[in-house]
Amino acid sequence: AQTVTQSQPEMSVQEAETVTLSCTYDTSESDYYLFWYKQPPSRQMILVIRQEAYKQQNATENRFSVNFQKAAKSFSLKISDSQLGDAAMYFCAYRSGGGSEKLVFGKGTKLTVNP
Amino acid sequence: DTEVTQTPKHLVMGMTNKKSLKCEQHMGHRAMYWYKQKAKKPPELMFVYSYEKLSINESVPSRFSPECPNSSLLNLHLHALQPEDSALYLCASSQEPGRGAKNIQYFGAGTRLSVL
């Protein structure tokens, strides 16, 4: 079974600075999708960014980018120019491209942004 | 527009009550999901509806009964719940079910359920 590990339960960053959240996963599959979701105190899970395993180019969405290292099974999220609104719980998630359609979540990283 | 709407936002119920949670999406998505999330934990999948048919039930107790009346609406009927069922219940939808690139799940804001 696939597993997703987020080794940083909590992280903090100063406003306007850059922070990187770590995620590693374990799979024997070659076809899969990776996601970062953000869950602020308002509770809604918001899709931040996604990466298809077959794409070598790292995904970017405005201030959010990923460093996808397929061989190392690593999928880190970089947040540039951090804003107070970035404070949230961040979940890394995996979905198989050929097996189960279920999302496998990591345990999450709580990000605090200091003014 | 990636909006999934859940009502109510908060619900308090006794163990003998019957209540329902509602989820709506108007994005034309053909897969809808119910998740349960306990505090400081990731969401746990409960049910998946694909093309309005139940495709996955993650061995959820029968006191939770899902219903998909049409492609835009998903209900979760609750009966005889236990205090340990108190949690945030999240609904999600995706353009298509399955394993392809169109299974990107978008979530609602959830219903905070308290069982007394």
Image (tube, rainbow, N blue to C red):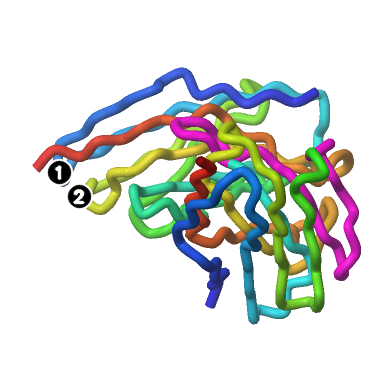
Mark closer to the chain start, 1 or 2? 1
What number of labels is visible? 2
Residue B51 position (above or below residue A101): below
Expressed as whole percent of the image width and height from the top left, the position of residue B87 reads 53, 41
Instruction: State yes or no: residue B98 in magenta.
Output: no
Q: Which residues are magenta?
A: B37-60
Q: Mark 2 and mark 1 in contact (Cβ < 8 Å)?
A: yes
Q: Quadrant of residue B25?
A: bottom right
Residue that sits furthest to the left in the current view: A115
Expressed as whole percent of the image width and height from the top left, the position of residue A29 reads 82, 31
Three-letter amino acid code at the position of disc 2 = Leu
Marker disc for residue A84: 2
Three-letter amino acid code at the position of disc 1 = Glu
Nearer mark to the viewer, of 1 and 2:
2
The quarter of the rendered structure image containing the N terminus of chain A is top right
Look at mark 1 in the image and give the residue it sits on.
A15
Judged from the image, the secondary structure of the residue bearing numbered disc 1 is loop
Residue that sits furthest to the front in the current view: B16
Instruction: State yes or no: residue B47 in magenta.
Output: yes
Marker disc for residue A102: none
Judged from the image, the secondary structure of the residue bearing numbered disc 2 is helix
How far apart, in angstroms, are the residues tagged by discs 1 and 2?
7 Å
Query: What residue is drawn where x is 65% and y is 30%?
Result: A70
Expressed as whole percent of the image width and height from the top left, the position of residue B29 reads 73, 72
> Dot 2: within a 10 Å radius of its alpha carbon, few (fewer than 14), some, or many (20 or more) residues?
some
Residue A45 appears in the picture as rendered: no
Q: Depth check: A112 or B51 in front?
A: B51
